[in-house]
Image (tube, rainbow, N blue to C red):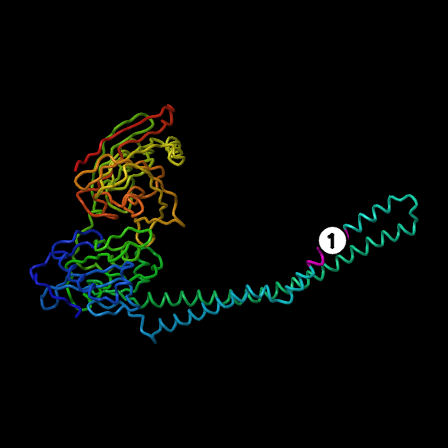
Amino acid sequence: MIFHPLNNQSFKPLAMNNPFYYQPNEVCLKVQKEIVNYIESKTEWQDEISAGKMFGFLIVENTDGAIGYLSAFSGQIQGKENHDYFVPPVFDYLQENGVFKTKEREISELNRKISDLEKSEQSLSQQSESYKKSQEILKEITEYKKFMKISKLNRESLRNNPDLSDEEKKKLIAESQFQNAELRRLKQRYDIENNNFITEISKHSDTIAQLRNLRKQKSEDLQKYLFEHFVILNAKGDKQDLLQIFKEYNNIIPPSGSGECCAPKLLQYAYFHGYKPLFIAEFWWGRSPVGEIREHLHFYPACQGKCKPILNFMLQGLMVLSNPLEECKTQDFETIFEDNFIVVVNKPAGMLSVTGKSKRVSVAEIAKKRFGEEAMVVHRLDMATSGLLVIAKNMDIYIKLQQQFENHKVEKVYYAVLFGEVKSSEGTISLPLMPDIADRPRQKVDFEYGKPAITNFKVDKVTHGKTYIYLYPKTGRTHQLRVHCAYRDGLAHPIIGDELYGEKSDRMYLHAMKITFTHPVTKQKVTFESKPDFNI
């Protein structure tokens, strides 16, 4: 059964929640519990899904007016996208004798051939007769050069003999000429055999290159086939494939796996069967992926990279609550210090540092109106973070301050409140960070490709299951403090109100409370402070 009836038939909100910003309600928690009970009954799944899997549900009103829910999982389970209890995929491309599987097998065969040729290429250099001969001649050349060196020393010794006849001198010259000619002949033989070997390798490498190009073309064709057959519906009844959707949204090729997340599956099934969507939610099951921050059974918004363009299309024609993070909102800041060159302001939580995709008014916009068109914000704070920001009144000052930030000459102190009790009183966190390409602006820990990120910390107090803490960033990576607090190999306790790496609250409890730098004109070291405006 795909449609699962609910006891609560009065749950009929006027508009569906926003999949990118929502708080699960009591009905959602009951639905999650039902789905969890079902998942736990599937003992054969546990090893696989414990490694991490996103599940989701959509509460709907069916054509008979009954309230129930649909459930889904991202990707596949046990190599299949179709399982009882869950909605089917948008496009079922995993049929054994279907186009996708057939083409996938062709690509797998190419992979096998390439692998075999690459292995044989390594042995070719050891087995080739031309290679062996060239190496023998190279050894002969080396030995002959040693012989020539000794011969030359002997000739020079003989030439120093005053009794040496003209005939003997001619013989010495002839010997030298013969040996040089013999060396040239050896080198020519080496060049011939080496060129033969290079030709052999080149033919072999050309074959591998041709197969690689064929594999690339087949992979691109297969990906295009997939995207063209993922035909997506919206609430108005319009249809578009993934290539059209992503082209119109941000003019890019869809990322691999697009259309296989929970939300598109759920909405597609609802639209196809005439159900009215009422509430959508997704939760994580299992361990957090390496480098990421995901908590078992925690609810998460839909991803930005794959789902944002698709849902932007699918939600057209449906009453959906707005995303507060994207709403037009006007805030103002407090000026802490101002002279002819710099301004230091206290940014409230919820205000952008610089203008972005959101319609919210930024510190940068107000600064230009208030302090002149040349005014520029020197560094940034996350929208959810409050605290001190430095503004330069002209480009020259901006460049000088930027250099201090780039050279780590600026000292910053943040104050935060974390969920849970941190056991260490102080220490250092060093976890390299990089953007999560599929779900910006999230960041993840990556020891291979991440940029160095270092934070010192000192606990202020621990009380009532919360940790009050000072954070001293030594680098300035995006979301550095938030990830370093939440990640399991960091403090393992998220900042209260961190919607990306923890849970919602009335605000994120992170405040930039102190900053020290050298004034770009007076050359005096200056320090500015601002007490946190929260107390919990």
Q: Is residue 497 above or below residue 229?
A: above
Between residue 182 and residue 163, name the one nearer to us. 163
Q: Is residue 125 above or below residue 298?
A: below
Pinpoint residue 155: horizontal percent, then vertical percent.
Answer: 83, 49
Picture residue at 39% right of the left edge, 36% below the top: 406
Verify whether residue 140 appears in magenta: yes
Q: Is residue 379 above or below residue 93?
A: above
User: What type of secondary structure mainly makes up the magenta span?
Assistant: helix
Quarter of the image with the N terminus in it = bottom left
Pinpoint residue 17: horizontal percent, then vertical percent.
Answer: 17, 54
Q: Is residue 330 visible?
A: yes
Left or right: 375 in relation to 236: right
Q: Is residue 370 visible?
A: no
Quarter of the image with the C terminus in it = top left
Query: Magenta region: which residues?
Result: 138-148
Q: Residue furthest bottom?
A: 97
What residue is shown with label 1?
145
Label 1, secondary structure: give it.
helix
So how many labels did they put on this image? 1
Picture residue at 61% right of the left edge, 67% below the top: 128
